[in-house]
Structure formats: C-alpha cells, structure tokens
Amino acid sequence: MIRTLAITPSHEVVTGLSLEDIRMDDYAWIWADFNNPTPEEAQKLESYFHFHPLAVEDCLHTLQRPKMDYYEGMQFFVLHALQSDTLQAVEVDLFLSEAFVVSFHQQPLTEIDEAWERIVSAANKKALAKDGPSFTAYTIMDKLVDQYFPSLFAIEDELADLESQGEKDSVEILMNQVFALRARLLRLRRTVVPMRDLMYRIVNSQHLEHHKHHAYFSDIYDHLLKLSDMIEADREMTADLRDSYISVNSDRMNTIMKTLTVITTIFMPLTLIAGIYGMNFVNMPELHWHYGYYLVLVLMFVLGAGMVVWFVRRGWFK
C-alpha cells in the first residue's frame, strides 16, 4: 500500500492522492509512505522517483545496518524499528530531499502511523510547508526511538522482580532467567547502538536540511545515549546477579561436600572395625568373648561420638 500526504504552497494538507495524480510543481513537498508494498508498488521507487539503484537495492533486500548515504539532491537513511514482543529489528528506509519524503517498510508499523498523524494534525502549517521534509524525518526517527523505551523498561521491571524473588526460586531457575534477560538485552543493544552511531553522524552532518532542526535531532541522540547507558547498566546488573548466583551455588555445593566428607570420615574407622571383625579367621580370640559384641558396639559409638564432638569444635558443621 502506498499512501501520500502533500502540502500545498498555501499550507494546506492533502491526503489520499495516488502518485500518478501528484505533480511535484503543484506542491511544496510530499510524503509517500510505502507500507508493506507489493512488488509492483516497490518498483515505483525507481520508475516514479528515479532513486539510485543502490538505495533501491537496500530497500528490497535483507536487513541492513542503520546508515546514511548521500545522493545527488537527496539523502538516504536506513533506520531500525523494534518489535516489542521479539525485540527483533525491522528496517525502515527513508529518502529525504527538500521536495519529498519517502518512507519504505515491509510491514505495518504503529510508529509510522503516529508520525503520519502528527504531520497531518500539525498546528503550524506555515512552518510545516517550509521545513516539512526535515521535520517529518525527525518525527519518524523520534517515534522509532521512543518505542525502544517500553521494551527496556519491561526488562528492568523483570530485573527488579528477579532480585526480589532471589530467596524463593532455585538457583537453576534464577540462572535461566538471568541468561534469558541478557539475551534480550543483547538483541536490544544490537538495535540501539547502531542507531546511536547513525544519529551521531546526523547531528554532526553539515547538510543544510539537518541544521534546520539540529536541536530536534540532538534530542533523539540524547535519548539513544540514555538507552545505551541503561542497557549497559542492566547488563552489568545481570552479570552481578549471575556471579552472585554462581557464588551461592558454589557455597551450597561446598557445604554439601563438607557434610558428606564429615559423615564419611566418621564412618571410616567404624567400617574398619566392622571389617576386621567380619573376617572369617579361626584364630580370632575376640570372637569368643562373652561380651565382645557389646564392647565393640560401645567402642564404635564412643569413637563416632568423639569424632562428631571434635568436628563440631573445629567448626566443620558451621
């Protein structure tokens, strides 16, 4: 689907026109949004707008890294939206010039819809007619970046819950949750960091279109810096939780091994005594003692109890 938005020289917003009905000379600028286009509609990037073949190829092929390219009289951006459920990146391509904005994405995005509604309902139509393409590009980028925050906040809420339930669940369950959170943070980082680097290039670009709204693009860059810092802080927190759980698990294992070692040590001399008197030699005078059985039991009890007392005093049961 291709939808269009055109601004007349008299500052009026016209929507619903087909590309064939639009004459560039009749409008201050236009915005054409390619929303999940068909192959025939995608061909209009080249047949109608005559975009550079390399830019068209980037739109039609696999997910590209966020970037900014300059072509004659036009700039081309590769941006990333974020799927909130899977945290997978969704490519959004943007063509920008003084006469038009063209957005291209392979699936419907609420961020683009929100940017569309903001431009349609803009209060200052005069300013929109003058600097509309640059402001539209800012609005799209701002909406895309704003959608990163809810996903990160959800992860931070899960981290807070994970810290509070540390006393309830087993270490294995907690470790699985920590590694799952780290994997989600890594997917989010793979989207945020390239977008941050791209926005740094945009903010420091000398192109005239950018400097009309330099403060706005700088605000997006500040948001991405904040997101990057939050992600790194959360990754450090998950690393600390992981190390803490590993330490707790190791301490538990050491306690168990120490307890088993104490028990084994206590029974070693008892097993030795039982083994000696379990031999079937004929000439063993102790076997014919009337109270020999009871004496050996008392000896084994005193020996075991004495070792337990000695281990307690040594602090082995702490």
Image: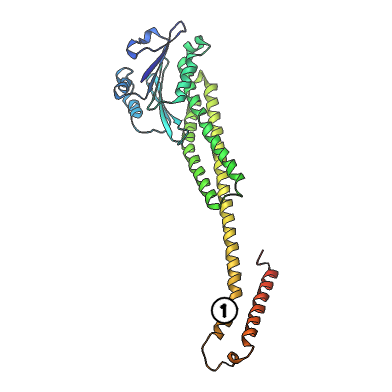
Q: Position of residue 297 (x, y in %)?
A: 63, 81
Q: Position of residue 196 (x, y in %)?
A: 50, 32
The answer to whether 142 appears left or right of 33 in the picture is right
Residue of label 1: 271
Residue closest to the far front: 290
Can residue 99 be seen from the camera position used here?
Answer: no
Q: Residue at x 61, y 85 (%)?
A: 293
Q: Residue at x 55, y 29 (%)?
A: 223
The answer to whether 12 appears left or right of 219 in the picture is left
Q: Residue at x 57, y 56 (%)?
A: 249
Q: What's the colour scheme?
A: rainbow
Q: Position of residue 260 (x, y in %)?
A: 58, 68
* Picture layout, residue 99 above or below residue 86: above
Tally the numbered discs. 1
- Label 1 SS: helix
- Is 317 or 218 nearer to us in this picture? 317
The answer to whether 186 appears left or right of 167 in the picture is left
Q: Amino acid at mark 1?
A: Thr
- Is 219 or 115 nearer to us in this picture? 115
* Picture layout, residue 30 above or below residue 36: above
Can residue 51 be seen from the camera position used here?
Answer: yes
Quadrant placement of the N terminus: top left
* Picture layout, residue 267 above or below residue 92: below
Quadrant placement of the C terminus: bottom right
The answer to whether 131 appears left or right of 277 in the picture is left
* Picture layout, residue 215 above or below residue 260: above
Residue closest to the far right: 313
- Is 10 or 203 nearer to us in this picture? 10
**Within-10-Å neighbours for mark 1: few <14, some 14–19, many 20+:** few
Q: Position of residue 36 (x, y in %)?
A: 36, 25
